Image (cartoon, rainbow, N blue to C red):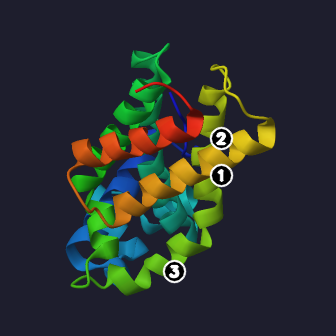
Amino acid sequence: MTQAVATGSGSGHTRQRIISAAIELTARDGWSSVTMGRLAEAVGVSRQTVYNEVGSKSALAEAMVLDELGRFLDAVERAFDEHPGDLMAAIRSAARAVLELAEDNVLLHAIVSATHAAGTDLLPLLTTHAGSLLSTARAVLTERLTRFELPFDEHQRGVVIDVVVRVVLSHVMQPSDTPDRTAQDIAWVAGRVLRAPD
């Protein structure tokens, strides 16, 4: 299972509770309303404990994003585990799982919603870490695709993976159809590129 969140200085359980509380506060009241004091009160610990576990507010934002990314990548891993010999089915299942998770993801909704302060306050922090997020997602797919025989060299495989990751992420942020139909379309395009049968 993918581990996207590094363990803090203290209890992993306390750190996770703080991150979860921060996500809930961001979704409800906006990122600008999230303070170490409010998090301490919500979790039932001291402000110093919050600082010890997550560090600065910028580090907290990164931890929140990586925590959510871990859930998405776990879904990708499960999809490939369920279809070990069928690349197109694995891609279709992985894309559908990611898009279904995105539908009910409170942090994503807070980021993209124009009615939340998080839409303006948190988005720049996400953009700052976009490179590491893309790298993490690409690394997971790269590891999985090396198990299949593909008619590409390493560079070409990297290009295909990068395109697939970016297409899926664009639909995560701005859906254009149902998760199932979008996943079907992504798998169809991947199949054409990979020259694999449907």
Mark seen at residue 135:
1
Q: Secondary structure at mark 2?
A: helix
Q: Secondary structure at mark 3?
A: helix
Q: Are marks 1 and 3 in contact (CB under 8 Å)?
A: no
Task: Give the residue type at disc 2.
Answer: Ala
Q: Is residue 15 above or below residue 32?
A: above
Q: Secondary structure at mark 1?
A: helix
Distance Cα–Cα, label 1 vs label 3: 18 Å
Q: Is residue 74 above or below residue 23?
A: above
- Residue 146 in percent (x, y) is at 68, 25
- Residue 24 in percent (x, y) is at 26, 62
Residue located beneath label 3 in the image: 124
Depth order, front residue of 128/162: 162
The quadrant holding residue 174 is bottom left
Q: Are marks 3 and 2 in contact (CB under 8 Å)?
A: no
The quadrant holding residue 186 is top left
Q: Earlier in the sequence, mark 1 or mark 3?
A: 3
Quarter of the image containing the C terminus? Answer: top left
Q: Are marks 2 and 1 in contact (CB under 8 Å)?
A: yes
The quadrant holding residue 121 is bottom left
Relative side of 68 to 6, left or right: left
- Residue 69 in percent (x, y) is at 46, 49
Task: Give the residue type at disc 3.
Answer: Pro
Distance Cα–Cα, label 2 vs label 1: 6 Å
Disc 1: CA contacts within 10 A as few (<14), some (14-19) or many (>=20): few
Task: Give the residue type at disc 1.
Answer: Ser
Q: Earlier in the sequence, mark 3 or mark 2?
A: 3
- Residue 39 in percent (x, y) is at 35, 66
Q: Is residue 30 above or below residue 161?
A: below
Residue located beneath label 2 in the image: 139
